[in-house]
């Protein structure tokens, strides 16, 4: 399994009870840490393409869930400084809105369609995080298909390119969801945890937070290598 880092939001904050936010200074330091070790952060499409011919040894997947507005303002400028790319997974039913699924928690603005298009033009990969950020195992078959297909079509209309990646809301995934994602035409999907459905359509990722300095990053990379040998 490739090493894939999971981020959400990168911005200054006063309160972060869900632990989804990394400060801009910390994020910049994390990217410098990667670059300083000869590692290159890349979008999932690039990581998976490089693994096929066996050229992914120094590559690390960078993923950003939910499509927060700070991806455009804080994340991408740092990535471009290092020649990195990343995959962002917007929630298509909330473009230009906020994280309505986190009711009662700090509101965070989301990218709108123009932002998403601009990120794709800058070389970032855009994948789907569903239409409404609902837990997929709780949905009927028809509702599940809608979340997968409608979000894919919307993003393809915005970016003018094929959308091949999906990210499971909350990391909730089982065999039915994996089959549905594959049937909807996605080439890969990101989960969070290792599970019985782990594979190219349920790739586990490594959570990165604001506490992750150099020592913790080293430990997380080492843990991944010991677990997966990559």
Image (cartoon, rainbow, N blue to C red):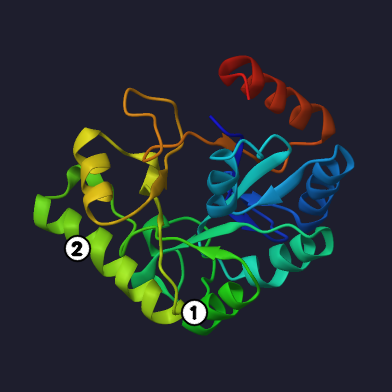
Q: Is residue 96 visible?
A: no
Q: Alpha carbon of mark 1 to alpha carbon of mark 2: how far?
A: 21 Å
111 and 79: which is toward the camera: 79
SS for dot 2: helix
The numbered mark at residue 146 is 2
Q: Position of residue 70 (x, y in %)?
A: 64, 67
Q: What percent of the width, then of the height, locates residue 71? A: 63, 65
- Mark found first going from the N terminus, 1 or 2: 1
Q: Residue placed at 60% from the left, 78% from the top?
A: 121
Quarter-of-image position of residue 86: bottom right
Task: Say which of marks 1 and 2 sits in front.
Answer: 2
Tell which of 17 and 70 is nearer to you.
70
Image quadrant where one finds the C terminus: top right
The local crowd at label 2, few if under 14, some if 14 to 19, many if 20 or more residues have their Cα within 10 Å, is: some
The residue at the point 65 percent across, 74 percent down is 122
Please say if 206 is above or below 107: above
- The x and y percentages for residue 24 are 77, 58
The circle on residue 112 is 1
Residue found farthest to the right: 36
Disc number placed over residue 193 in the picture, else none: none
Q: Residue at x 60, y 65 (%)?
A: 124
Q: Residue at x 76, y 51 (%)?
A: 27
Is residue 159 visible in the rendered image? The answer is yes
Between 157 and 25, the residue placed more toward the observer is 157
Q: Mark 1: few, some, or many residues within 10 Å (few <14, many ≥20)? A: some
Secondary structure of the residue carrying tag 1 is loop
């Amino acid at each position: 399994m490739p090493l894939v880092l999971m981020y959400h939001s990168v911005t200054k904050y006063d309160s972060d009870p869900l632990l989804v936010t990394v400060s801009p200074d910390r994020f910049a330091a994390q990217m410098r840490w990667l670059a300083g070790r000869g590692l290159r952060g890349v979008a999932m499409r690039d990581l998976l393409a490089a693994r096929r011919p066996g050229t992914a040894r120094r590559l690390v997947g960078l993923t950003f869930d939910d499509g927060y507005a700070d991806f455009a303002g804080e994340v991408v400028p740092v990535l471009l400084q290092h020649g990195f790319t990343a995959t962002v997974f917007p929630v298509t039913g909330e473009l230009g809105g906020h994280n309505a699924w986190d009711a009662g928690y700090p509101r965070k603005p989301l990218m709108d369609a123009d932002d998403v298009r601009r990120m794709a033009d800058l070389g970032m990969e855009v994948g789907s995080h569903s239409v409404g950020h609902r837990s997929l195992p709780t949905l009927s078959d028809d509702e599940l298909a809608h979340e997968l297909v409608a979000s894919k079509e919307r993003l393809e209309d915005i970016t003018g390119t094929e959308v091949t990646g999906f990210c499971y809301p909350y990391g909730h995934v089982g065999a039915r969801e994996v089959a549905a994602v594959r049937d909807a035409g996605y080439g890969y999907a990101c989960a969070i945890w290792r599970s019985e459905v782990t594979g190219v359509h349920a790739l586990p990722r490594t959570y990165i937070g604001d506490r992750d300095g150099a020592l913790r990053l080293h430990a997380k990379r080492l843990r991944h290598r010991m677990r997966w040998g990559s």
